[in-house]
Image: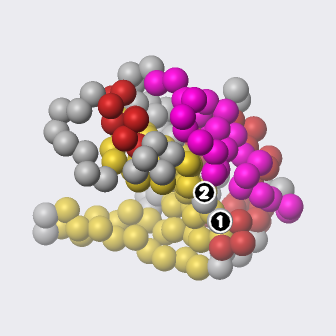
Amino acid sequence: MNYYDNEEIIFNSEFQSKKLNFNHGKKINESIVDIKLDGTEDIYYKGESENEQIDFKFQNLIKKSGWIHFNNGASFKINKGLIKEVKLYNDSLGKLKHLNSDEIKSKIGKPSKIEHDIITYVFDPVDEGDIYHFKDRHISIQFDPDTDKIKEIRIK
């Protein structure tokens, strides 16, 4: 499946997040029960114990909340076995990672909210860039502070 075609859907004026396809052909609010793991995924769920096997983690994720991180940079936020959010990062962004904030505004309009993300590692503040929130589209786009190119997209 070529989910880089999602770019056309994201910029469509009649955008609906449920039309987007991601890893394993999955969409927002679909079940994860039929996903076949290949062992390269990282899975985290609320209440997990140290050294759990990936298949055990996956079965618990069907009943609990957590994340599946795929090796291409895509992640699914899961709540009781349903995909509630998708995060695109690195290779999973495809052609989208070459777009800057001005190009995004020209394609889908002014964001409903802009926040500047600064996090602290130990005692040092780290500039993570601007995040544009598009409330009507249920999308947040984070831009790299050095290049102004897309760093991450979150879709709910």
Q: Amino acid at mark 1?
A: His
Residue stretch rendered in magenta on the structure: 13-37
Coordinates of residue 118 in the picture (x, y in percent): 34, 70
Q: Specify which label sits upstream in the sequence, 2 or 1.
A: 1
The picture quadrant where one finds residue 150 is bottom right
Residue 30 in magenta stretch: yes
- Residue identified by numbered label 1: 138
User: Real-space Cα distance between discs 2 and 1?
Assistant: 6 Å
What element does badge 2 sit on?
strand
Residue labelled with disc 2: 155
> Which of the pair 46/150 is nearer the observer?
46
Q: What percent of the width, then of the height, locates residue 153?
A: 56, 54
- Determine whether, in the image, residue 74 is placed left or right of residue 19: left
- Residue 147 % position (x, y): 49, 55
Q: Residue reaching furthest left?
A: 123
Q: Residues within 10 Å of mark 1 (few under 14, many from 20)?
A: some
Asked if 122 appears above or below 5 in the picture, the reply is: below
Disc 2 residue type (three-letter): Ile
